[in-house]
Amino acid sequence: MKLNHVVASLPLMGAAAAVEMTRYAAASDVEPAFATYLKELYASAEDTSATETFTDFFTPTGQLLVLGHVATGADAIVALKQQLLPAVGTKHWNHLPKATTVDSETAGQKTYQVLGVIETRFDGGNCSQAYYSSRFTVTKDAAGAAQLAPYTGGLAAYDEFIVDPPESPTHIPCGTL
Ligand SMILES: *[C@@H]1O[C@H](CO)[C@@H](O)[C@H](O)[C@H]1NC(C)=O
């Protein structure tokens, strides 16, 4: 096979493209490291075949919550992920995070809120978008710093509590502000 054919077929293999952070805007009390953390987390979430690369972010009892559906622990998290984004790879996600703030903080954990746009594209179908609000609760280390190294098991909860409109595909074309 010629190299250009190999390159052309790469997106069909479910390889996640780099997450675009062009609209990301964080409040001053959000650590700069959170941007990279979020970028890596979304890259794993968008990779249709990702299992451990996604669940490695979570604590052993970590939770993925999507519009009230609750998955606790790695097996349930993978099952919910694959229910929303099948591993066969004909549905694709693209997260575009925007305003990011600190929602709450305790001695043991810090919760960030991220507002953004999620684009959904189906092979052979259209690209439509929805607006999401999510909260990420990250545990702190002994020194009181949020554990923002990707893939190191510090994520206690990823809670996507608003997706508007909730259906997929939506009636809103991708690229709408
Ligand atoms: C995308 O396709 C679906 C299903 O055909 C349709 O319901 C939806 O309105 C379309 N969205 C856009 C933005 O064209």
Image: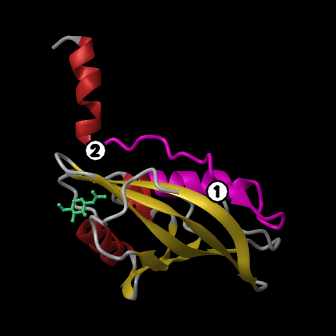
Indicate the position of residue 177 as horizontal and vertical percent values.
53, 57
Q: Which residues are magenta?
A: 14-43
Q: Earlier in the sequence, mark 1 or mark 2?
A: 2
Pointer 2: what residue? 14
Q: Name the side, left or right, on which 42 lies relative to 50.
A: right
At label 1, counting other C-alpha atoms closer than 10 Å, the crowd grade (few under 14, some 14-19, many 20 or more) is: some
Pointer 1: what residue? 149
Q: Quadrant of ligand 1?
A: bottom left
Q: Residue furthest top?
A: 2
Report which quarter residue 51 is drawn in: bottom left
Q: Is residue 158 above or below residue 152?
A: below
Mark 2 residue's CB less than 8 Å from ligand 1: no
Q: Amino acid at mark 2?
A: Gly
| Residue 33 is a magenta residue | yes
In this orientation, which residue lies closer to the viewer: 7 or 125?
125
Q: Amino acid at mark 1?
A: Ala
Q: Name the side, left or right, on which 41 lies relative to 53.
A: right
Q: Is residue 129 above or below residue 133?
A: above
Dot 1 lies on which element? loop
Report which quarter residue 17 is drawn in: top left
Quarter containing the N terminus: top left
Dot 2 lies on which element? loop
Q: Residue at x 45, y 50 (%)?
A: 175
Indicate the position of residue 154 as horizontal and vertical percent values.
59, 69
Q: Residue at x 34, y 58 (%)?
A: 128
Q: Residue at x 38, y 86 (%)?
A: 70
